[in-house]
Amino acid sequence: MASIRIEVDADPIKVDALKIYLGHKNTSLEVEILHQIESLYNKNVPSNVKDFLAEYIENEGK
């Protein structure tokens, strides 16, 4: 599946602190942001749309 790049403006001190403390938990800011995107997708996209997209993606390679 293709991916896109998302840019956001954030406080650099907070981002640095997150990177440090997430590193202590053996994870990264990027991984945690991807988890949040997945969580937002699951919470906000209706199940019939998710089903359609899953089927579309599955059949795209055929």
Image: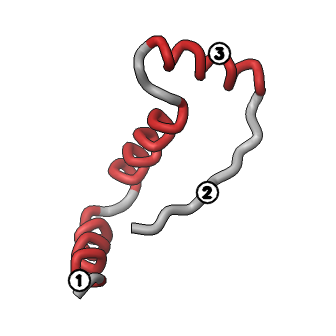
Q: Which mark is residue 59?
A: 1
| Residue at image location 23% in from the left, 83% down from the top | 59
| Residue at image location 46% in from the left, 47% down from the top | 37
Identify the secondary structure beneath mark 1: helix
Q: In this figure, which residue is indicated by the disc labeled 2?
A: 5
The single residue placed furthest to the bottom in the displayed view is 62
Q: In this figure, which residue is indicated by the disc labeled 3?
A: 17
Type of amino acid under label 2: Arg
Instruction: Indicate the quadrant where residue 54 lies.
Output: bottom left
Give the mark nearer the N terminus: 2 vs 1: 2
Using the numbered discs, state the Cα–Cα distance from disc 3 to disc 2 in whole angstroms: 22 Å
Give the mark nearer the N terminus: 1 vs 3: 3
Crowding at mark 3 (Cα within 10 Å: few <14, some 14-19, many 20+): few
Q: Quick check: 54 above or below 43?
A: below
Identify the secondary structure beneath mark 3: helix
Q: Position of residue 11 (x, y in %)?
A: 77, 27
Type of amino acid under label 3: Ala
Q: Quick check: 38 above or below 46?
A: above
- Quadrant location of the C terminus in the rendered image: bottom left
